[in-house]
Structures are given as C-alpha cells and as structure tokens.
Image (spheres, rainbow, N blue to C red):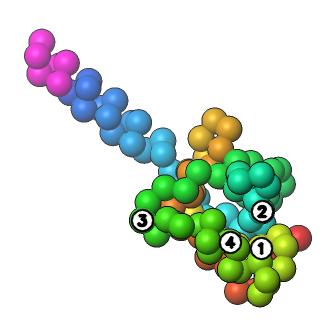
Amino acid sequence: MRLGLFIAVLTLCFAAKAQTQLDTLEGWWTMQDGQHYFEDNELIKVKFVGEEVWGMEDYYAAMVPQLGLPLQVIIIAVKKEDFLEVYTLNPSPEGCDN
C-alpha cells in the first residue's frame, strides 16, 4: 500500500514537471505603466524569473534609444494562465518574422 502511494506521488511529480515546457518565442517586448509585455499574435504580461533577467527595467531603458520601439526579442519562457514567465531575453539579431 505504501509503495503504491509512493509510486503514485512520484508519478504525479514527474507529470507536473513535464507540463512546464520551456518555449523559445520571437516577438516584441514593450513596457507600459511599469508592466512588461511580450507581443507575438497577442499581448501578454511578462514576469521575469531567474538571475539572467534581473534588472530588465534598466536594460529596457538602455536598449530603446539604440533600437527603437518596440524591441524585437527572442525569449525562453513558460506560458502560465495570464502571463509568461521569462527565463532569458535577447535582442533578435535579424528582427522578427511577420
């Protein structure tokens, strides 16, 4: 009984882990009223997660004069209910396809 319960819990943990798939997306990064957004086919709020994306407000402010608005970027993120958890963000070297 205990072994069966342990296996069930372990299976659920692996299933939950498998559902958080990281995606690489190309689109536009904008900011309005202190909230960051990513836009591809729709506008979605962004939450930065991890050390690689700390201080994005300063980075955004520095990049806008150089590249203009909106910034074309490539991100690695996980889609949550109403926002993206962004783990990496890099300027798109060739622009976005559209």
Question: Is residue 64 found inside the magenta-colored segment of the image?
Answer: no
Cα distance in 3D space between marks 2 and 3: 20 Å
Q: What residue does disc 1 label?
A: 71
Task: Name which residue type carries label 4.
Answer: Tyr
Residue 74: where, in percent of width, then height? Answer: 66, 71
Residue 80: where, in percent of width, then height? Answer: 59, 41
Circles 1 and 2 in contact, beta carbons < 8 Å: yes
Residue appearing at x 59%, y 67% in the figure? 56
Q: Which region of the structure is painted magenta?
A: 1-6
| Mark 1 element type | strand
Q: Splitting the image into 4 quarters, where does residue 41 fall?
A: bottom right
Q: What residue does disc 4 label?
A: 60
Q: What residue does disc 2 label?
A: 30
Q: Earlier in the sequence, mark 4 or mark 1?
A: 4
Circles 2 and 3 in contact, beta carbons < 8 Å: no
Cα distance in 3D space between marks 4 and 2: 9 Å
Residue appearing at x 68%, y 38% in the figure? 82
Q: What residue does disc 3 label?
A: 51
| Mark 3 element type | helix
Q: Nearer the viewer, mark 4 or mark 2?
A: 4
Residue 65 placement, left or right of 85: right
